[in-house]
Amino acid sequence: MAEEWLIALGLVLILEGLIPTLAPKAWKKAVSEMVTRPDSQLRLIGLVLMLLGMGWVFLIR
């Protein structure tokens, strides 16, 4: 079980590293735009992404 979590973490790190590697200017722009957004909007985006991820995991299983 721990091995699957470590693999999942590794995949997350790979996916998180793709955008700055392939499109660093777009990544910088997106990060700088996030700074200007209100916390409530960022929380909502985070919640939606978590729910999509959970749905994906349950769909795959």
Image (spheres, helix red, strand yellow):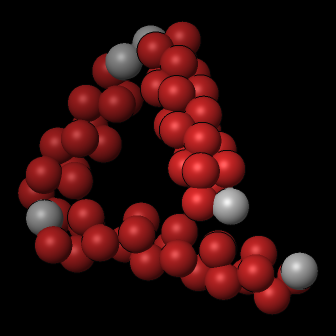
The image shows residue 60, relative to residue 31, as above or below, that is below
Tell me how many marks there are: 0
From the top left corner, tell me how far across and down residue 50 is, in percent: 60, 39
For residue 58, side relative to residue 45 (left or right): right
> Could you tell me which quadrant the C terminus lies in?
bottom right
> Residue 35, relative to residue 17: is it above or below?
above
Q: Quadrant of residue 3?
A: bottom right
Viewed as shown, does residue 41 lie left or right of 51? Answer: left
Q: Nearer the viewer, residue 28 or 54?
A: 54
Q: Residue 48: x percent and y percent?
A: 52, 28
Q: Position of residue 8 (x, y in %)?
A: 64, 74
**Viewer-proximal residue, 3 or 36?**
3
Of 41 and 60, which appears nearest the observer? 60
Residue 46 showing in the rendered view: no
Name which residue lies at 87% across and 82% down.
Answer: 2
* Residue in the image at 32% along x and 21% along y: 36
How far across and how far down the image is residue 54, in percent?
Answer: 64, 44
Q: Nearer the viewer, residue 9 or 60?
A: 60
State whether residue 55 is above or below residue 16. Answer: above
The residue drawn where x is 67% and y is 50% is 58
Residue name at image x 76 percent, y 81 percent: 4
Whether residue 5 is visible here, answered yes or no, is yes
